Amino acid sequence: QVQLVESGGGLVQAGGSLRLSCAASERTFSRYDMAWFRQAPGKAREFVAALNWGGGTYYVDSVKGRFTISRDNANNMLSLQMNNLKPEDTALYYCAAAKPTRPFAPRSQLYDYWGQGTQVTISS
């Protein structure tokens, strides 16, 4: 069982930056595909970015060029650097991990473990 704990959310003005972190309990973290999802009030959960064990990435079009996903396998950490934030980025952001047997794809159904989320609020 992988436990994931997100941190780094907060309230910032539009145009600002935040860096989200996700600490994983699993000592074989490096073998897991990892991703960030978000859910705004009244909306469905949305894929944001994913990073597989080999360094491959996916980003949703709305964050390309603004967000960067990265991982520190030595410390079992996943990060999401978010720049030039917009009010529409406001959401609860979740970290997720997929078992090594899963295909790598930006689909929530393929992720087996989820954190509790960290709130990101962008004011205009």
Image (cartoon, rainbow, N blue to C red):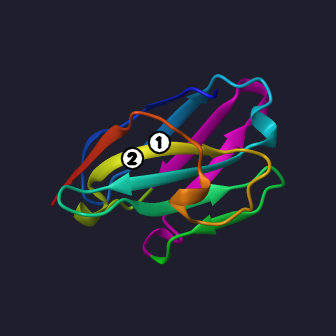
Residue at 47%, 40% in the rendered image = 20
What amino acid does circle 2 point to? Tyr
Determine whether, in the image, residue 39 is placed left or right of residue 51.
left
Determine whether, in the image, residue 49 is placed left or right of residue 86.
right
Q: Secondary structure at mark 2?
A: strand
Residue at 46%, 68% in the rendered image = 63
Pick the residue in front: 32 or 82.
Answer: 32
Pick the residue in front: 24 or 108.
Answer: 108
Name the residue that disc number 2 marks.
93
Residue contact between numbered discs 2 and 1, judged by CB atoms under 8 Å: no
Residue 1, picture quadrant: top right
Residue 32, picture quadrant: top right
Q: Which residues are magenta?
A: 62-82
What amino acid does circle 1 point to? Arg
Q: Work out whether 79 lies above or below 58.
A: above
**Residue 73: percent from left, percent from top:** 77, 34
Q: Secondary structure at mark 1?
A: strand
**Residue 87: percent from left, percent from top:** 23, 62
Determine whether, in the image, residue 29 is placed left or right of residue 39.
right
Q: Work out whether 96 lies above or below 41.
A: above
Q: Work out whether 9 lies above or below 40.
A: above
Query: Label 2: few (<14), some or many (≥20) within 10 Å?
Result: many
**Residue 91: percent from left, percent from top:** 28, 52
Residue 75 located within the stretch drawn in magenta: yes
Using the numbered discs, state the Cα–Cα distance from disc 2 to disc 1 in whole angstroms. Answer: 11 Å
Q: Earlier in the sequence, mark 2 or mark 1?
A: 1
**Residue 124: percent from left, percent from top:** 15, 61
Pick the residue in front: 43 or 62.
Answer: 43
Q: Nearer the viewer, mark 2 or mark 1?
A: 2
Residue at 48%, 61% in the rendered image = 48
Residue 19 shows which numbered tag? 1
Determine whether, in the image, residue 53 is placed left or right of residue 111.
right
